[in-house]
Image (tube, grey):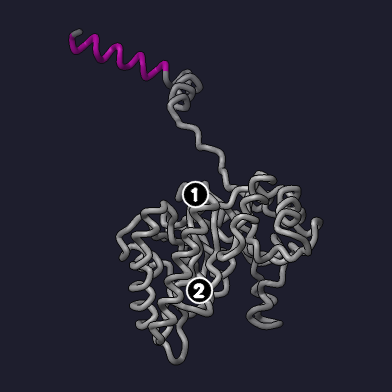
Amino acid sequence: MNRREFLKNGSAALALTALSPGAFAAEQTSEVVAVPRRKIRKAIMWATVNMKGSVLEKMKAIKEAGFEGVEMMGQMDQDEVLRARDETGLVIPSVCGAKHWDKPLSDPDPSVREQGLEALKQTLHDGKRYGATSVLLVPGKVTKNVSYSEVYERSQAQIRKAVPLAEELGVKIAIENVWNQFLLSPLEAARFVDEFNSPAVGWHFDVGNVITFGWPEQWIHILGKRIQKLHIKEFSLKKRDSEGLWKGFNVRFLEGDNDWPAIMKALDDIGYNGWGIAEQGGGDSPEGLRDLSQRMTKIFAS
């Protein structure tokens, strides 16, 4: 093809494109990869299920309400939990430590720190037996007598002792953002996790706990793939301001100040497709459990 033929053919192609933009657009669109549908699985934290009854009876109510899983507490009767899990078909994706508040890894007393470490190791063993992929850990708490830097150093030192076991068992240690006056920004939270240099340490992100001093979507973007599980919790700034700090949690899903569309968009942005675990009041009856489940479905679709 000589230069004249090249220009002639090129002009014809451009003219065809201008005359039939639909055909050109269809060709371009056919190459776009479809965005996968969001998949966040519904679970509920065991400590919030306040109905009377045995473990099996409660798990049946959880299942009937539409939940797929339940986050158990550490140091329960493992055999009883497993029988109930297997009979109901519920999944146990996470186990919450039972001793991290009264035996904190940051305590000034070395013997208390060691008790906290042993409790963490037991929770990891619980998680392995239940089939959980992570355990929830509160790493310590800052007080007037325990400084921020002390909590940082002591908790990291104790967690490092548990990392080999977590790696061996294949159960991650997921650190939660709670009101412990510690790890108060997402940048610091990410740094704290990264300093372990181990895939066995990640984050258990609590949506509601952030709202009084930040924006969950910002935390999600920064923590990214470090997030192992989610606690789904509502918070009302109006109730906080008028009735007191802790009263902010006394509100039902979708009736507080969580910007759920922005939160879900942030989770989409980081490719999160794991578990959303309700830590919310209302689980004291079958009707309450169903209401929680239905509201969570709306949240995950927002």
SS state under label 1? loop
Stretch in magenta: 2-16
**126 in magenta:** no
The N terminus is located in which quarter? top left
- Closer to the camera, 182 or 123? 123
Number of residues whose C-alpha sits closer than 10 Å to that of mark 1, classed few (under 14), some (14–19) or many (20 or more):
many
Mark 2 or mark 1, earlier in chain: 2
Q: Residue furthest left?
A: 2
Question: What amino acid is at disc 2?
Answer: His
The quadrant where residue 54 appears: bottom right
Residue depicted at x 41% and y 79%: 113
Of residues 76 and 283, the one nearer the viewer is 76
Secondary structure found at label 2: loop
Let me know if residue 300 appears in the view: no
What residue would you read off at disc 1?
Answer: 272
Q: Is residue 3 magenta?
A: yes
Image check: 107 left or right of 153? right
Q: Are marks 2 and 1 in contact (CB under 8 Å)?
A: no
Please give the name of the residue rendered at 75% of the width and 48% of the height, measured from the top-left corner: 64
Task: Name the residue at the front extreme.
Answer: 79
The percent position of residue 194, horizontal first and vertical second, equals 33, 62
Decide which of 13, 266 is in the foreground and name it: 266
Q: In the figure, 143 relative to 60: above or below?
A: below
Please state if 10 lies on the left or on the right of 280 as rendered. left
* Dominant secondary structure of the residues highlighted in magenta in the image: helix
Foreground pick, 208 / 263: 208
Determine whether 68 is above or below 239 in the image.
above
Image x and y of residue 56, in percent: 72, 54
- Residue topped by disc 2: 100
Query: How many numbered discs sit on the rendered protein?
Result: 2
Is 66 situated above or below 231? Answer: above
